[in-house]
Amino acid sequence: MKIYINGEFFPQKEAKVSIFDHGFLYGDGAFEGIRSYKRRVFRLKEHIDRLYETAHTLMIQIPLAKEEMRSAIVATLKVNSLDDAYIRVIVTRGEGDLGLDPRKCIGRPNVIIIADKITLYAKELYNKGMEIITVPTVRNYPEALNPQLKSLNYLNNILAKIEANNAGYAEAIMLDNQGYVAECTGDNIFIVKNGVLSTPSQGRLKGITLDTVLMLARSRTIEARERFITRHEVYTADECFLTGTAAEIIPVVKVDGRVIADGKPGEITLKMMAMFKALTRKSGVSY
Ligand code: PXG
């Protein structure tokens, strides 16, 4: 595997950054997770835009223009000869001292691109559906650390993931600071009731897969809403599924011990999975 660091490719063992990098010391940086299918990068523009938006709020000046970032991502895929890949783009504050102060990071931000494979959940879960729980750790308050920032500090989500894992589950629902459903630790959540799709409007990452599902649904005149959702509505939904670049679309059949409808992946969920699969194979930036 060859890893891109600041314009050069390194073998995995030699791909290193300083331990004084504030990305390592403080989680001070931004990242993106992107997928390519059959040599096409899915929604690359949207991922790059989101990365630059996170960096903008963190006041990290990415030392590449968006077009250069796009070329660097494509070059990393080519160098690694990957037809289907999971791409991780990382931008750190760069090397500083042992204090928090970002102004002490005098070097440039580090830009790292890793292209590899990822399988988040077992294949059978995509057929059978998964069981998830709600965990006590609430999603970050938007005015403390906005969930829209895809920052390198994922401890909020990791604490929730640990709670899920401790209880024997692979994924968890996180509530927002008012107790409404926000999202999962690394995925967005949808419910279907009476043929209408709904996803939380607040307290969550603006998922690119979520956005794709909304677009696909509306293109088929399936009503799709972003609104406040309670756990009761999840328990009593006709269908439930999660979305994410890594997870893609995965059905959920049990939440907090409550079986969702008949305990099988729903019709609209299956339709969305099929439409998503078809779209990923026919759109995107070719390389
Ligand atoms: N919510 C959160 C908190 C995420 O981190 C999503 C939703 C889905 O967004 P996209 O744009 O990918 O549809 C994410 C992204 C993992 C892992 O190992 C998951 C993500 C990122 C990095 C690692 O589960 N998901």
Image (tube, rainbow, N blue to C red):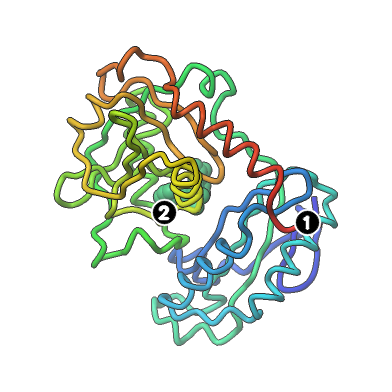
Mark found first going from the N terminus, 2 or 1: 2
Residue type highlighted by circle 2: Tyr
- Mark 2 residue element: loop
Residue 131 vertical placement versus 116 (above, below): above
Ligand 1 within 8 A of label 2's CB?
Answer: yes
Residue lying at the far left in this picture: please name it.
Answer: 178
Percent position of residue 208, x then y: 50, 53
Front position in the image: 177 or 162: 177
Front position in the image: 131 or 198: 198
**Residues at discs 2 and 1 in contact (Cβ within 8 Å):** no
Front position in the image: 61 or 26: 61
Crowding near the residue tagged with mark 1, few <14, some 14–19, many ≥20 C-alpha atoms within 10 Å: few
Percent position of residue 95, x then y: 56, 77
- The circle on residue 91 is none
Residue 206 vertical placement versus 255 (above, below): below
Residue at the (56%, 42%) spot, across then down: 246
Crowding near the residue tagged with mark 2, few <14, some 14–19, many ≥20 C-alpha atoms within 10 Å: few
Residue at the (58%, 78%) spot, across then down: 62
Quadrant of the snapshot with the C terminus: bottom right
Q: Which residue is mark 2?
A: 154
Residue type highlighted by circle 1: Ser
Residue at the (17%, 30%) spot, across then down: 232
Location of residue 92 (image quadrant): bottom right
Percent position of residue 69, x then y: 68, 71
Location of residue 238 (image quadrant): top left
Q: Which residue is mark 1?
A: 286
Location of residue 143 (image quadrant): bottom left
